[in-house]
Amino acid sequence: MRNEQVKPKYTYRTNVCLAYNAMLTSALLDAICYLQMKGDEAAQKHIIDLCVLASERAEELAEELETAGGDL
């Protein structure tokens, strides 16, 4: 049996984009915790919506980058 390398799902550059998105999402989650302590539910909901949109867009961007050959 031959050793075959498994091709990664995304290229290095795409993974960097996804990592930056994860860092942004983490910062937004910290903001949610702060707002939760302050009791501002409307702002919490708005930030949660932003997190969801950012995550969805990051996945779309990753697919677009891979389709374009992974070139930023």
Image: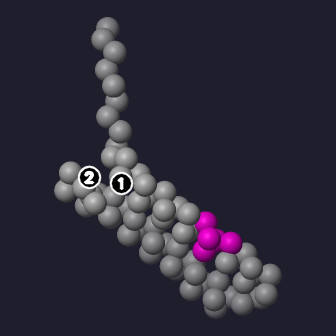
The residue lying toward the viewer, choosing from 66 and 41, is: 66
Q: Is residue 66 visible?
A: no
Most frequent secondary structure within the magenta stretch:
helix
Report which residue position mark 1 lands on.
14
Q: Amino acid at mark 1?
A: Thr
In terms of sequence position, does the residue under pointer 1 or pointer 2 come before the other? 1
The answer to whether residue 57 shows anywhere in this view is yes
Q: Furthest residue to the left?
A: 68
Residue 26 percent location from the top left of the image? 61, 66
Q: Relative to residue 19, is residue 47 drawn left or right?
A: right
- Which quarter of the figure has residue 43? bottom right
Provide the secondary structure element on which disc 1 rests. Answer: helix
Give the residue displayed 49% in from the left and 72% down from the top: 52
Residue bounds of the magenta highlight: 26-30
Residue 15 in the figure: left or right of residue 43:
left
Give coordinates of residue 27: x percent, y percent. Answer: 62, 71
